[in-house]
Image (cartoon, grey):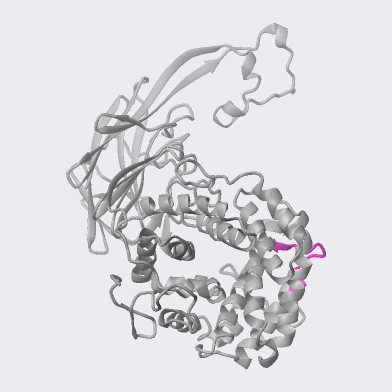
Amino acid sequence: MGAGVLLGPSGQAMASIAEDDGGNPPETKPHWLVDLIIANDSRLDDLDQIKKYRRVNDANSPDFGGILDRYGLPQVNSTQSFISGAMCAVTSPESNYFKSKEVMQVVKDASACLLEAQHDDGTVDLLSHNFYSPPDTAFRVRSLVLVIKMMKPLYQEIPEGEETYNNLETFVRRATGCLLDGGIHTPNHRWIMCDALARVYELWPDEKYVERARQWLAEGVDIDEDGQYRERDTVGYSPHANRALLTTAKIFNKPEILEYVRQNLDMTLYYLITNGQVVEEVSERVERDGRRMRPLANQYVSYRHLALLDNNGTYAAACRHVERHNFDQIRANLDYLLDDPALWNHLPESEPLPRNYVREFTGSGVVRVRRGHYDASIISRYTKQGIFFAFHKNEAILWGMRLGSSFSGFGQFESENIVRDGDAWVLEREVEGFYVQPVPEEHTPLGFDWDFDPEFYDTYGLMWHTENRERTRVHPFKQKAVIREIDRGFEIELSTTGTANVPTAVELVFKPGGRFTGVEKHEDLDDTYFLKEGYGRYHAGGDSIRFGPGTYLHSNTELRGTLPRMEFPTVVLTGMSPFEHKIRIT
């Protein structure tokens, strides 16, 4: 079988997630699925603590029974997530909580809370951002339909089962209206809506659900030539989109949609780094919330589905990679796995995952390089955090390198393109600083009729009518990064030229949790260090990254007009333009 032997959470040996002979779905659950059910039980092992600290216990509160999120808010999503995980246990004979009266009492109250939180139009709120939200309702519906399907054969045998089942079915029925006429506000929401429509169609077949999904699909899937979705969120919304498109293709019989999922799964293999996780350095999602990588487990269901459908050994290897590194995290997809016995079949033999490559993703403006035990990302068009280079060596991770200069508010280095020049990748940016003259008399008086030019408003504050003003004392500024592979790593040649005496800083931003040697602590700022000369090292998880040599001409680590300092361990090198410095990362 070529998969090796794994240990499941129950401690027993398991021969990969592939127990049976393929073909028709097996009649009984394979051992690996039983191990996931047992792993899922851990969600309920602290049920007393959940009841005491993580739910609303005030019977007079409209949120009674709701499960609190990490901020102490009774969110619909945290409540639904609890219900889904609990019902995977309660409906599985292999679980320690099969038909548990104690668990069902909590689930029943949580299901009643969902109904209380639902608006008259069928929508729910995401308290951190969205209100009367059709897409957030769709997220809940697609999961709750799986719960309803799990409960349907035996809800009358489960304590509190009939009331809970009725509550969940009522919630989904109420939600159908907003699925049929509701809008969205991010690209992936279209496919979540289609997913929810397909799930409802499973319960109550009606062509109106097919037609509404067709309207969203008619827009075309937002995927580039590299296989990257518009939001470029490799660890979060790409997995959501893939699962949604798989469901839509299966239930609405649209196999052509699967080609988009294949493209994204192929691309994702080149974003897999040496510690087994997937990088998110290119994400264009607004929230960003500090994460930079997550396990490939989010894509497990999609890889498994298409490994079996296509007899694809590379996808099978991706599944086994997850099983080996992050088996316990597959339980987040337990409801999907329980719902579709076809996923229980034997995986095909593995084919090698990419481990040694240079891959240019022109649509995304990213170059990915991997050399066995280390890898790097070279990034352009990155408009959120200014990172243009990242380096990973197992748990020793340079999350990003940034270059900034205090130049007229235009000093944060970002490159529109990556250009290959011989053995190097070149990123560069040219801007101009200037001053403006009085508005010509034919365009005055202006008074308080301020017509702000958005291009310059942030930089020049209360300047207005810039289109009518002559620019004078125009002075250029150029920033450049030339990146080359060297033995065991990379050399980054940085320069700032054009206008002299401009303070410049290079930031090396590392993953929290490691330790530094060879650097000097900033006197005032936490987790901020200078590399004034020589080489420094960052140590984590038995690996280390060597960086340098250093340079130091000033102590300003937060240059005016650049992005704010990131709240992560950062080593700073400083200089003045014309600035030229080579940094080696190994």
Which residue is at a point 55% across and 74% down the rendered structure image? 335
Reply above or below: 154 against 544: below
Question: Is residue 223 or residue 348 the one in the foreground?
Answer: 348
**Residue 290 x/y as whole percent:** 46, 55
The magenta stretch spans residue 125: yes
Residue at the front extreme?
Answer: 23
Reply above or below: 182 against 547: below
Which residue is at a point 40% across and 22% down the rendered structure image? 477
**Residue 84 x/y as whole percent:** 60, 76
Which residue is at a point 25% across and 44% down the rendered structure image? 531
Q: Which residues are magenta?
A: 115-126
Left or right: 42 as drawn, with respect to 175: left
Say if residue 126 shows up in the picture.
no
Task: Give the quadrant of residue 353.
Answer: bottom left
The magenta stretch spans residue 565: no
**Residue 51 x/y as whole percent:** 61, 84
Which residue is at a point 38% across and 33% down the rendered structure image? 418
Say if residue 38 shows up in the picture.
yes
**Residue 474 x/y as whole percent:** 47, 15
Name the quarter where the N terminus is drawn: bottom left
Left or right: 275 as drawn, with respect to 183: left
Task: Give the quadrant of residue 177.
Answer: bottom right
Question: Is residue 300 or residue 65 the one in the foreground?
Answer: 300
Left or right: 414 as drawn, with respect to 105: left
Question: Is residue 201 or residue 360 the one in the foreground?
Answer: 201
Left or right: 572 as drawn, with respect to 429: left
